[in-house]
Image: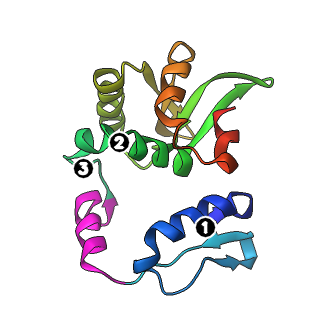
Amino acid sequence: MHSVKQKKYVEWVYKKLKPFVHSPPKLYTPTQALRLRTISHSTFTSLRAIFYREGKKILPSTIETIMTDPLSVAMWFMDDGNAAKSYGILHGYHLNTQSFSEEENEKILVLFAKLWDVDCTVQKNKGKHRIFVRSRSMNAFADIVQPFVLPSMQYKLG
């Protein structure tokens, strides 16, 4: 589910997944969020097996391969990222990876350094951990994702 202000992004995802979706995104009135529901399909079953173990989200062993694709990183950012600002001043980016363990987040930051020369750290957020792209790597990170970030999602880049 995504906020109605991200409608263009949800429509874009819908177009990409159209063969796997019975109907266009629908408004979930209680939260004013758009919901896209896919059909049951073996592809999604396989993906679930990669990203979930015993009902808990895990970092897949294939994460390095996934992270080499700038479109994958951009979609991750559009889905779960945001500009980190203090007093209106941009000082980095977050990837909201709170569902992963601290160790899994550490692996992600090592891969960002190895694959993209992007310097990150793991920050605590409400007792969980997430990735913070440091200010010195903001431009490098933006260079990776910006070509793929939809115009309606550019606000996430600050």
Residue drawn where x is 48% and y is 43% of the image: 74
Q: CA distance from mark 2 to mark 3?
A: 12 Å
Rendered image: mark on residue 101: 2
* Residue 54 visible within the image: no
Q: Which residues, given as a range, are shown in magenta?
A: 40-56
Query: Label 1 belongs to which residue?
Result: 11
Residue drawn where x is 22% and y is 69% of the image: 46
Q: Magenta span has 98? A: no
Mark sitting earlier along the chain (1/3): 1
In this view of the protein, which residue sits in the foreground, 123 or 35?
35
Q: Is residue 92 left or right of residue 37?
A: right
Please state the total of marks drawn on the protein image: 3
**Please, which colouring scheme is shown?**
rainbow
The amino acid type found where label 3 is placed reads Pro
The amino acid type found where label 1 is placed reads Glu
Q: Residue furthest right?
A: 87
Query: Label 3 belongs to which residue?
Result: 60
Q: Quadrant of the C terminus?
A: top right
Callout 2 touching callout 3 (CB < 8 Å) = no
The amino acid type found where label 2 is placed reads Ser
Image depth: mark 2 or mark 3 in front: 3
Secondary structure of residue under mark 2: loop
Q: Magenta span has 45? A: yes
Residue drawn where x is 29% and y is 47% of the image: 59
